[in-house]
Image: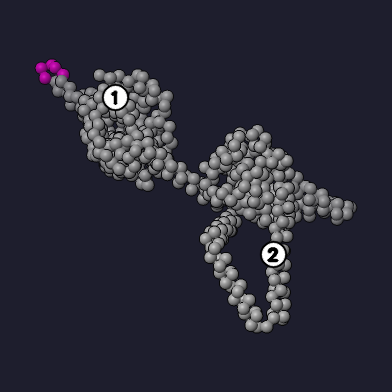
Amino acid sequence: MHIETIINRVLVKYPLFGSIVAHTQFVGEASVETAGTDGEIIYYNPLFLSSLSREEQVFILAHEICYIAFHHIFRSEGKDSELWNIATDAVINALLKQDGLPLVKGGVDIPEAIAYDAEGFYQKLLEEKKEQQSDTKKEQKGNTKKESSQKGDEESTEKYHDVGHDTHSMWKQATLKKQREEQEKGEGNATNGLEEEKIENQDNLFDKMKRMFSRKKERQALHEEEKTEKTQELESKKKKQEEMQNRVQVGEREVFKQNRIERKRQLEELQNELAKEALGHGDSTNSDVRTIANIGTSTPLLDWRMLLKEAVKYDVDWSYENVEIEDGIVTTYLEEIPRPETEIVLDTSGSIDEVLLRNFLRECKNILQTSKVKVGCFDTMFYGFTEIKNEADIDNLSFYGGGGTDFNVAVNAFTNRVENKIIFTDGCSTMPSKEVDVLWIVFGDTKISPKGGRVIYINQEQLEKLNSRGKTR
């Protein structure tokens, strides 16, 4: 187990905590039973982390990072420390679980905490404790106040007492350390003031002015030498402080919500970049022309009669309403029953190879059995529809594309009068901003979430069967 690997997994899950992680030191420490933090360093027991699953490891480190991100340790000053510990654990754990991470054994698990930020849930627990103490005092009139109060304290937190997946033992030490530093800083400022006053009383004005001028020059020289480094350090510290104050102000729930939005954005961006990298074409359109030989046919992957609107009823082929009888011979007329109309847009970007395109076209032939069909191609532009009257028209099609993928182009290609709109794709691009009632047929493992329509996935196993049973002619 490498701690860097776990940290990277945390950052993939929680990109908004990147600045926290960058300023945090992670130290393996066998004396720490599980994991803990003093607000600056996260300590962990390597054996404990190794005993957990990958998702549980992410849970533990994300849990500790939250203490630092939301200033939980130093916000405990003036609070009931046990209730604050429970409140922060309950809220963090509920939010981590909501993000799909498994609660590590021994952690605080209070589902209702998902509706609160740490401060709000602390106040709730505090009110519960006060009520329980009041009820205990009434029940224990014969006991001393001390005994009653102690019992109330025990009962108030008993149901929340299982907090075994990390330690808060460093919190008190960290808080005391901060108090000492602030006190020493205050005393130092007071001492400096007294020294200045003493100098004023002992020296004349001329000497004082010389000294002030000399000090000013020294400060300017020092400032020039260290200006860049100090400026960067101060700016970084100021930015870190502002980010922390903002997180505390908006609360844990809102930050986790913002993180989910940011993570989705980054994943979509990464997916798009990977697709472009695989294509080698970026946002361009090459307008390459391809022809696919030996397209063949295959058994339909889907029941198109059920999927397409206004599907044909195959049990009504002949009509006897307008029969004619002449010389004793009955003549019937074959009526053309209305067929649904379908527009199909094929993804012909650089990520679609010949095998995948051939599979698209075989399904187009199957659709042709139940519907009128028009087929068009797109990458970052749409190349127009071609009316398909028979399978030979599909066999003779030319396919333009080979560039990047723009689904906005695809959904905008459909006409309003046609109810059946189908996109065949591998799904490798950002979803369109427009909401359209489209049937998305996705070949492969890429999961998509368009705003409108329906998504049907053709997985790898189905593709392999399709390829193995496909007929060519």
* Residue type at tag 2: Lys
Q: Badge 2 local density, few (<14 within 10 Å), some, or many (20+)?
A: few
- In percent of width and height, residue 98 lies at 57, 43
Q: Nearer the viewer, residue 227 or 173?
A: 227
Res. 333 in view: yes
Q: Quadrant of the N terminus?
A: top right
**Quadrant placement of the C terminus:** top left
Tell me residue 118's x, y (percent).
64, 52
Across and down, in percent, residue 144 comes to: 88, 54
Which numbered mark, 1 or 2, is in the foreground of this view? 2
Question: What's the amino acid at mark 1?
Answer: Tyr
Residue 186 lies in the magenta stretch: no
Residue position for label 1: 314
Residue 459 figure quarter: top left
Residue corresponding to mark 2 = 185
- Quadrant housing residue 221: bottom right
User: For the magenta stretch, what is the residue range?
Assistant: 326-330
Mark 2 falls on what kind of element? helix
Front residue of 75 and 452: 75
- What is the secondary structure assignment of the residue under circle 1? loop
Residue farthest left in this picture: 327
Disc 1 from disc 2: Cα separation: 89 Å
